Every structure is written in C-alpha cells, then in structure tokens.
Image: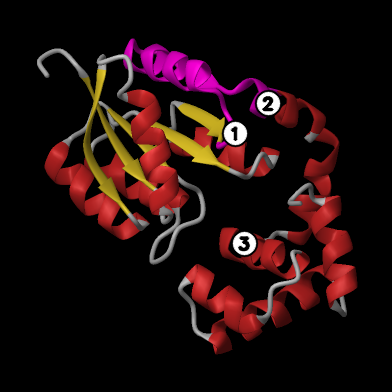
Amino acid sequence: MSGSIRIFIADDHELVRDGIKSRLTLSGEMVICGEAENGARAVKLCKEISPDIIFLDISMPEMSGLDAAKEILENDPDARIVFLSIYDNPEYVREALRIGAKGYLLKDVSREEMTLAVKAIHNGGTYLGSKVSQSVVSGEQKQPAACKYNLSERERQVLIEIANGSKNKTIAEKLNLSVRTVESHRLTLREKTGGGNAAELFRIANELGLI
C-alpha cells in the first residue's frame, strides 16, 4: 500500500515472525516487505529491499543480530534497526545502541507499544521499551563484572545455554555451531570466569544478568 511503513523481520522462529506480522499489519499503516530466518539472509535481503524499519532478533543462526546490524549499517548507514529480543541484559542494549540501532524491545512487548516504537523510529526518533529502560538502569552495577570477564557475544550466548541446562549437542544445533566449537567455548568460559562446572557457570550467568 502506498504510504505504508515497510517492515522487515528477521527471527529464526517462524511463529515469532508470524506474531509480529499479525500485530503490525492490523492497523493498515504498515506492511511486511520481507523476512529472514537468520542474520546472513537478513543482510542480503535488506540490501536488496531497503526496508523502512528492520526488526532483528539478537540470537540467530549463521550470523547474530548484532553482527547482521553492523553489516546492514555498513551497506546503508541510514537503516533503522530495532532489536526485538528475549534478552534484557544491559550489555546487549548498550551494544545495540553503540552499533547504531534505533530501538530495542523485549518480545513480550504489547502490540500498542510495538506500534508506538515503529512510528517513533520511522519519524526519526529512537525507542527503548519500558522494560528495557528499567533493565539498563538496574544493570549498571553489574557492568564491571561483565567487563572483567571480557566475554564475546558468542561466549555469552553459550553461557546462557549452559546456564539453562542445555547439553553441547543442543547448544550446537541452536547456535548453528559444531559440537567441538561449543566444547571450545565451554573451556574458554571456564578459563575466563573461573567457573569449573555447570553450577558455577550458572551462578556467573546470573551475576551478569544473563538469566
């Protein structure tokens, strides 16, 4: 439709993509111009389509949302990216904004707030979800610990899965890694954090606000 806000959605769960589409297209002011199930495909399609607003999940196969955002913004510095994630960790939020994202929402956001965010960003503004803003403020005291461990984004993702009780094979499948790579990340996490077993890694993940 002419004059509609063109939305692109990247998330590795089809159910989530369908949910976002049904929410945003109800008013008739927005249309979905494309979607992707991983970060690499999102980069490719956004370069071809040039959407008005790009929704990215943080954790996706092949290329994370954060890495995809960097490439999308390299191709188009004016791209308007909104992260929609289950993670409210302040580090993720700050990194998303540092990269150049215009918004960050949690996946349990209401339809009204999601629509408000899209309109605000489309009009040239930025938008942090209400729960995200609270998380950034409350997480300030946890930031020094995260800096101390100096974890990469992938190491944080693996740590979250370990803390959730996932086995190496499950983590490998979810993050699109080999089992050997997951084992290597486990070893690196133990070396960096001093967490010798799963229980200690769970405690550290909780300390960093990752779970």
Q: Is residue 60 left or right of residue 144?
A: left
117 w.r.t. 135: above or below:
above
Measure the C-alpha gap from mark 3 to mark 2: 21 Å
Label count reads: 3
Q: Residue at x 46, y 46 (%)?
A: 57
Q: Residues within 10 Å of mark 3 (few under 14, many from 20)?
A: some
Q: Residue type at mark 3?
A: Gln
Picture quarter containing residue 106? top right
**Residue identifier under label 3:** 157
Q: Is residue 116 magenta?
A: yes
**Residue identifier under label 2:** 131
Contact check, label 2 and label 1, Cβ < 8 Å:
yes
Q: Residue at x 45, y 58 (%)?
A: 60
Q: Which residues are magenta?
A: 107-133
Q: Residue type at mark 2?
A: Lys
Contact check, label 1 and label 3, Cβ < 8 Å:
no
> Helix, strand or loop at disc 3?
helix
Measure the C-alpha gap from mark 2 to mark 1: 10 Å
Q: Residue at x 43, y 54 (%)?
A: 13
Camera-side mark, 1 or 3 = 1
Picture quarter containing residue 133? top right
Camera-side mark, 3 or 2 = 2
Q: Residue type at mark 1?
A: Asp
> Helix, strand or loop at disc 2?
helix
